[in-house]
Image (cartoon, grey):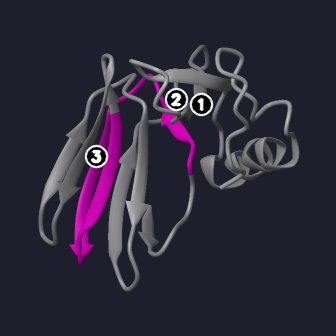
Amino acid sequence: MAVGGPNERNDYHVNETEEWFYQYKGGMLLKVVDGETFKDIRIEEGEMFLLPANTPHNPVRFVDTIGIFVEATRPPTSNDSLQWYCREPVHTMPTIIHKENFHVTDLGTQLKPVIQRWKDSEELRTCKECGKVAPPR
């Protein structure tokens, strides 16, 4: 799928298969959770990156950029998830506030309602550990 920037999301997508990124025009930032650490991976114009399966990731695309990503067809038993983390400094490691699992048949249409539920619900956005409410975006 070809995608352009800019985008503004604060969720992390997790799928059980690898994901391949190619940056056609401009650069992008791929935010990931690697074990117990948040990391930023730059993918510049002309570069490729293969994201391992089960890696929480948030692709950040900038103005006037174009990228291509390829995801494998999901096996019938697989589930993807969207998850959101509390970014308050009281946490010493990534702390999930909310996670929603679903089987993907059409990622383009299935993400929007999950993200909208997050935006609309202060309860979903409230960290159970520290009590802070995460911003909707």
Give x and y (percent) for residue 125. Answer: 75, 35
Q: Is residue 107 above or below residue 105?
A: below
Q: What's the residue type where badge 3 is placed?
A: Trp
Q: In the drawing, what numbered circle is on residue 20? A: 3
Q: Secondary structure at mark 3?
A: strand
Residue 75 relative to residue 21: left or right: right
Look at discs 1 and 3 and give the one toward the viewer.
Answer: 1
Which residue is farthest front? 90
Residue 52 relative to residue 112: left or right: left
Identify the residue under disc 1.
83
Label 1: how many Cα within 10 Å (few below 14, some 14–19, many 20+): many
Q: What's the residue type where badge 1 is placed?
A: Gln
**Between residues 47 and 93, which one lies in front from this camera angle?**
93
What is the distance, in whole Å, between disc 1 and disc 2 at their CAs?
A: 19 Å
55 part of magenta stretch? no
Dot placed on the residue nearer the N-terminal end, 1 or 3: 3
Which portion, as a residue range, is magenta? 10-32
Q: Are marks 1 and 3 in contact (CB under 8 Å)?
A: no
Q: Count how many numbered circles sit on residues in the image.
A: 3
Look at discs 3 and 2 and give the one toward the viewer.
Answer: 3
Dot placed on the residue nearer the N-terminal end, 1 or 2: 2
Q: Is residue 27 above or below residue 120?
A: below
What is the distance, in whole Å, between disc 3 and disc 2 at their CAs?
A: 14 Å
Q: Secondary structure at mark 1?
A: strand
What is the distance, in whole Å, between disc 1 and disc 3 at their CAs?
A: 20 Å
Identify the residue under disc 2.
74
Which quadrant does the C terminus fall into? bottom right
- The residue sitting at 12% across, 61% down in the picture is 47
Q: What's the residue type where badge 2 is placed?
A: Arg
Give x and y (percent) for residue 68. Answer: 34, 63
Q: Are marks 3 and 2 in contact (CB under 8 Å)?
A: no
22 part of magenta stretch? yes
